[in-house]
Image (tube, rainbow, N blue to C red):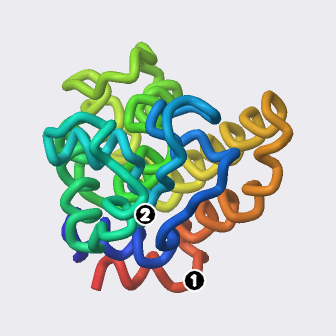
Amino acid sequence: MMTPHDFAKDFITRWEGKLSLDPIDNGNWTGGKQGVGALVGSNYGVTAAALAAHRKVPVATITKPVMAALTLDEAADIALAQYYRKPRLDLLPWNRVTASIFDMGWGTGPSQAIKLLQRMVGTADDGINGPATAAAYKAMLDRFGEAFVSALWWSRRYDFYDAIIKSRPANAKYERGWKNRSDYFTPGGDGWWSRFAA
């Protein structure tokens, strides 16, 4: 079975490009919002804020050349530290659905992915993963099975992306990629389901 670190490298390699300088992507700005701060881009899906937090330096020290020099190994380390361990996803049973939750948190921020998980399992949607959310998630997996819960999670991802596009139509250009990514983490998705367990 893939470890969380192996999985991070896998989804980063599969879904994230190298340096992106798209000015309408909020994550490409040091201020975290279009037009706020400097346009330094993101690399392997890592934003300036995430890189600065990982290196424990001010975000203003992250420049385009610094961002361009980021390695895949450091990106995976950031994913594991900031998007898996820090938001306490390690309280959840490690499986393919949890991997997809981890992946979504990489793109939306962990608290947003956790809120969607909490709504799915029926716990308070405060965006903080804790024992109650973990227990409800485990109970859902035990009752319905991983493939069924994967389908539920997939629909949550789709609904979230539809809501983003409705509120910000400029993001429609990302829709197919976001949904392809969601599809990938389902039992029929490109062989990933069986490869994860190998």
Q: How far across and down, in percent of the image, does residue 62 sit?
A: 32, 48
Q: Earlier in the sequence, mark 2 or mark 1?
A: 2
Residue 134 % position (x, y): 26, 33
- Residue under the image location 21 percent in, 72 percent down: 73
Q: Is residue 156 above or below residue 151?
A: above
Residue 121 rendering spot, x and y as whole percentages: 45, 30
The tally of labels here is 2
The answer to whether any part of residue 120 appears in the image is: no
Q: Nearer the viewer, residue 132 or 108?
A: 108
Instruction: Residue 183: name its quadrant.
Output: bottom right
Residue 177 vertical position relative to residue 162 in the rendered view, above or below? below
Q: Is residue 78 visible?
A: yes
Q: Which residue lies under the disc numbered 1?
A: 190
**Image side of residue 138 versus residue 124, left or right:** left
Q: Nearer the viewer, residue 77 or 91?
A: 77
Callout 1 amino acid: Asp
Position of 139 relative to 90 (above/below):
above
Residue 8 occupies which quadrant of the picture? Answer: bottom left
185 left or right of 143?
right
Mark 2 nearby-residue class (10 Å; few <14, some 14–19, many ≥20): many
x%, y% of residue 16? 49, 68
The part of the image, by quadrant, that contains residue 173 is: bottom right
Q: Image quadrant for the C terminus? A: bottom left
Question: Helix, strand, or loop for circle 2?
Answer: loop
Three-letter code for the amino acid on which mark 2 is drawn: Asn
Which corner quadrant holds the N terminus?
bottom left
For disc 2, the marked residue is 43
Instruction: Report how far apart the C-alphas of labels 2 and 1 lie in the structure.
Output: 24 Å
